[in-house]
Structure formats: C-alpha cells, structure tokens
Amino acid sequence: MSDIRDWRPFVYGGMASIMAEFGTFPIDTTKTRLQIQGQKTDRSHSELRYRGMTDAFVKISRQEGVKALYSGIWPAVLRQATYGTIKFGTYYTLKKVATDRGLLHDKAGNESLWCNAACATLAGAISSAIANPTDVLKVRMQVHGRGTSDVGLVQCFREIYVHEGIRGLWRGVGPTAQRAAVIAAVELPVYDFCKLHLMETFGDQVANHFISSFIASLGSAIASTPIDVIRTRLMNQRRVHQLQPSITPAATTTTTTTPRLYYTGSVDCAVQTVRNEGFRALYKGFIPTWVRMGPWNIIFFITYEQLKQFY
C-alpha cells in the first residue's frame, strides 16, 4: 500500500507553484485590471482604461512603472505557498487513497475520469478556501498599482482588518472555492489524461509535459473565467457610505449614511454585471487568463515533474 502520509507531493507542489507565479504574475495583473474596469455600480472603476491585455501591459508600465506589474506579488507567493502546497499535495494523496481502494482504475487499468475529477475538485475547493485571505490581499494590491511601495503586505492586511473586519479577508470565498474547484476538476484530470495518452509518442519527457499542460490550460480558462470575474469584483469591493433621507419629528429632512456593498453576493454580482455590461463582460480578461494559464501550467508541471525525479 502506498504511503498516504508522503510529504513530497505537498512540498513539490508548493515549490512548483511559486516558480510558476513569479514567471507569469505581470499577466495576472493585466487580467485583474481588465476584470474590474467598466463596472456601472462602482464609479471608481467605471472607466474603460484598457482595450486589452497588451494595452493594459503597456499603459501600466508607462504610467505606473514596471514595478506596478508586480503589485501584490508577495501575497501571491504566500498564496501559492499555502494554496499550491495543499491543492497538489491533497490531489495526489487522494489519488493514492483511491488507487489503494481500487476506485481509480477500471479493469483495463485506465484511470476513471470521474474519480480523478472528484479528487481534484475536493482538493481545489479546500485549499482555496484556506488561502482566501492571501487572494484578497493580492487583488487589492494589484488594483492599487502604484501602491506596491506605499501600501505593503502588512499595511494592506491591517487596513482590511480595521475597516472590514475578519470577514473582509474572506470576501469572495464562495466564488474563489468554486473557481478553484472548476479549474482543478478540468486542469488536473486533463493534464493526467493527455500525459498518459502522449506517453507512447513522447515518453515521460518535457515535450509531453509541455503539450499536456497547454491543453489543460485552455479548458480551465474557458470554464473558470466567468467565476474569476465575479470573484475579482467581490474581493475588490469595499463598503461605501450611501446618503439616505430621513424625516425627523420636526418634519425637517436630514441625511444619514449607511455602509453598503456594491454586490451582495456571487449571484447579484453576476446579474448586475450581465445586465449593465452584457454577457461578454463575464469573459473580461479571458485572453490574459489563458495566456497566463498556459505558461503557468507549463512552468508548474515541468518543475513538478523534474522535482519528482528526486522520489
């Protein structure tokens, strides 16, 4: 029986995730900027500043400096150190458990797609929920842009905690877990499936890992982008004060302020986004999402496969 307490998938998954994050983070910043722009309900982000990924990349570099493309890199690294470690370690551990119990392979020796997807979905949802505060910090710092040097990781954390409480750090945890579950359910099984079927042609070599990871990234980008748009907008929103009229006993009109959120939840965010900006708004940032996922997965899986040589 394989040892389900093996720590190596966790460590190797975390290390490979951090490597991939450093290599693709500027693309993720352009994706975040594209996803939050054009919101009718949030005046601070109602303007369409960027025409696409390339335009966003150029404008951010020129107007805010190249350093702004790495705004939020440290919470992103912290996120991968937790999320990546837990997700990939849990996924491969669950596969070992399923194999030991005879659930993963059929009589012909082929892996069950549904069992594979179930392991990946569970691993993705659990790990993303745990790492949600680091995701919130990353999104806030990416949107802030030039705040990389002015608003550091600790200061950003303190600001959210003071003004929004502990719940602010878990803002958007629902769609975050859903997105991670969708990505994991598509990405990991597709990668394993492609790798297995390309083994006769390429063997267990870098070319196989490259092609398999690229195919996996396209499927996960298509499936996850709408959830990612909703997640980003929920994470970025802050409580705002809205003026409301009130009548005093003296019949004089006064105004009071009540804090509110632009979106009350995932469904409300999706409905308002489609109603105000059209269905295509749910795919804002799709190109940088795919462009990032491709290299991210390639860097991750190649790094992970190389680290596995130490097994």
Image: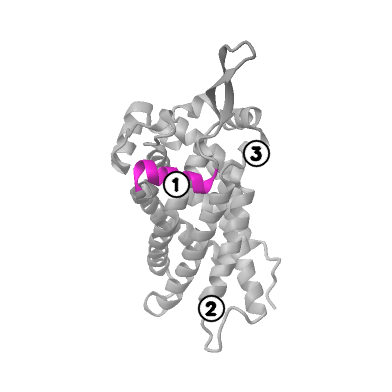
Few, some or many C-alpha atoms within 10 Å of disc 2 (few <14, some 14-19, many ≥20)?
A: some
Q: Left of 35 or right of it: where is 235?
A: right
Mark with earlier residue (3, 1): 3
Which numbered mark, 3 or 1, is in the foreground of this view? Answer: 1
At label 3, the amino acid type is Arg
Q: Which residue has dot 3 on it?
A: 167
Q: Which structural element holds mark 2?
A: loop
Q: Is residue 288 above or below residue 218?
A: above
Residue 271: assigned label:
1
Question: Label 2 to label 3, Cα distance in Å?
Answer: 38 Å
Percent across and percent down for residue 86 are: 62, 56
Few, some or many C-alpha atoms within 10 Å of disc 1 (few <14, some 14-19, many ≥20)?
A: some
- Judged by its main secondary structure, the magenta piece is helix
Q: Is residue 41 above or below residue 109?
A: above
Q: Which residue has dot 2 on it?
A: 112
Q: Which structural element holds mark 1?
A: helix
Q: Is residue 25 visible?
A: no
Q: Is residue 95 above or below residue 36?
A: below
Residue 84: assigned label:
none
Which residue is at 43% across, 66% downward? 209
Query: Is mark 3 in CB contact (under 8 Å) with mark 1?
Result: no
Question: Label 1 to label 2, Cα distance in Å?
Answer: 36 Å
Which residue is at 51% across, 54% downward? 179
Mark with earlier residue (1, 2): 2
Q: Left of 81 or right of it: where is 148?
A: left
At label 1, the amino acid type is Val
Query: Is mark 2 in CB contact (under 8 Å) with mark 3?
Result: no
- How many marks can you see? 3
Q: Quadrant of the N terminus?
A: bottom right
